[in-house]
Amino acid sequence: MSANNWVMCPSCTAKMVTAFDAEERALAAGYGVISPETWLTKRRELDARKRNGLTADKHSFREDYEIGVRNGEFHVNYLGQCTTCGFSYKFEHKETLKT
Ligand SMILES: [Zn+2]
């Protein structure tokens, strides 16, 4: 495959959102239980992370792909792999051109 691109990993992003939601629930449960100063510090931290957008490493998912016509066939080959979590996705399609 010839072309490549680095993007945010969909699996890492989903895991990060799940972890963030767990932190939000833990903070909500801590209201009135932990000290107000600690609670406010954590609230501000979570709000700042939310404002900045929840993003995983933007360059951990490598995409290699190729699309075109060759020897009377149309083909699409795609492989995406994360260097952080190992998630991968592969897609291949080929069909004979009807000329
Ligand atoms: Zn990943």
Image (tube, rainbow, N blue to C red):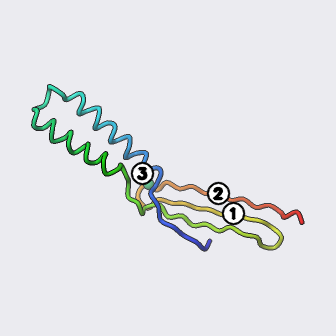
**Which quarter of the image is occupied by the N terminus?**
bottom right
Ligand 1 within 8 Å, label 3 CB:
yes
Quadrant where the C terminus sits is bottom right
Task: Where is residue 51? Give x, y as percent.
Answer: 30, 47
Q: Secondary structure at mark 1?
A: strand
Residue 12: mark in rendering: 3
2 or 3: tag closer to the N-terminus: 3
Spot occupied by residue 34 in the image (x, y as percentages of width and height): 13, 31
Kind of residue at badge 2: Phe
Label 2: which residue? 91
Occupied quadrant, residue 69: bottom right
Sequence-wise first label, 1 or 3: 3
Q: Secondary structure at mark 2?
A: strand
Is disc 2's CB within 8 Å of ligand 1?
A: no
Pointer 1 residue? 76
| Residue that sits furthest to the front in the current view | 51
Q: Nearer the viewer, residue 87 or 78?
A: 78
Instruction: Please name which of the two marks, 2 or 1, marks the residue nearer to the observer.
Output: 1
Could you tell me residue 25's position as x and y percent?
A: 29, 32
**Picture residue at 40% right of the left edge, 58% below the top:** 84
- Identify the residue shown where x is 32% and y is 41%: 20
Left or right for 98, reference 12: right
